[in-house]
Image: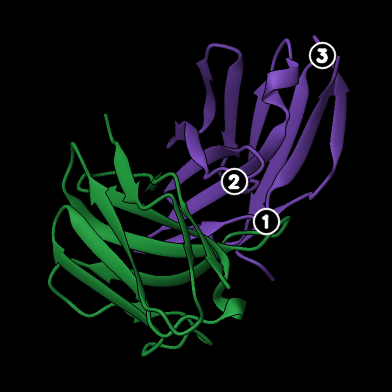
Chain colours: A green, B purple
Amino acid sequence: GAVVSQHPSWVICKSGTSVKIECRSLDFQATTMFWYRQFPKQSLMLMATSNEGSKATYEQGVEKDKFLINHASLTLSTLTVTSAHPEDSSFYICSARGWGQGGQPQHFGDGTRLSIL
Amino acid sequence: QKEVEQNSGPLSVPEGAIASLNCTYSDRGSQSFFWYRQYSGKSPELIMSIYSNGDKEDGRFTAQLNKASQYVSLLIRDSQPSDSATYLCAVNTGNQFYFGTGTSLTVIP
């Protein structure tokens, strides 16, 4: 149980392109979804937290207009990197957290490796 | 002070030994504690959850929680080369979720 599907797994595109990444919880309803980015040999960096039907909460230093997050349902969140540039190249990972008492863990997708040429 | 602290390592143990990974947290109100394993180039995967004081065993893994001392540990018995990865400690406090920076473990054949 607790499977999170993330697509695409790999994207290569030209500078200026917008890229959409999908994150789906397949067998549970996700009250909260999280988006992270990770550079090689570095720690996870939380970008934003989203709850279904409400606006995402972005971490300090993350541009809201650059990284658009939509959490339209209890099983789907999307991250759109708008007008991507080479410095946006990174490993983007989503996670989802479901209902339950006692604190539910985050379950991670497989990540999306984004390369901007 | 960071909410969750881990020794970044690297920690090296010989195959078959016990690997001990430690984590401390700052908020006494923290309720839930998790260990994740992250292989290089992959996303984290949940390996253990622990909610109450004491030990919790799952196969070769044992999580230990001591709320009075505010630490969580993970023991890996009979370590295998396939256990070589970065181990992330995570703590849930209310609506917040905090990750440590991870401890890199290398199991030497």
Q: How far is disc 3 from disc 1 in space, using C-alphas?
A: 24 Å
Element marked by disc 3: loop
Q: Quadrant of residue A51?
A: bottom left
Looking at the rendered structure, the secondary structure element under dot 1 is loop
Q: Chain of mark 2?
A: B
- Residue type beneath disc 3: Ala
For disc 3, the marked residue is B17
Residue drawn at x 64%, y 30% is: B74
Q: Which residue is mark 1?
A: B101
Q: Position of residue B54 (x, y in %)?
A: 54, 27
The residue indicated by pointer 2 is B89
**Residue A78: x %, y % from top left:** 27, 65
**Residue name at image x 76 percent, y 41 percent:** B104
Same chain assignment for discs 3 and 1: yes
Q: What residue type is disc 1 on?
A: Thr
**Figure check: B3 above or below A96:** below
Mark 3 or 1 closer to N-term? 3
Asked if residue B54 shows in the view, the reply is yes
Q: Which residue is more in the foreground, B61 or B45?
A: B45
Could one spot residue A103 in this view of the protein?
A: no
For marks 2 and 3, the one nearer the N-term is 3
Rendered view: B62 above or below A9: above
Tell me if mark 2 has few (under 14), some (14-19) or many (20+) residues whose alpha carbon lies within 10 angstroms of its own: many
- Please name whichever residue, A56 or B95, is drawn nearer the observer in this view of the structure: A56
- Name the quadrant of the N terminus of chain A: top left
The quarter of the displayed image where residue B101 is located: bottom right
Chain letter for mark 3: B
Tell me how far mark 2 sits from mark 3, CA to CA: 21 Å
Label 1 is found on which chain of the structure? B
x then y, percent, for residue A11: 45, 59
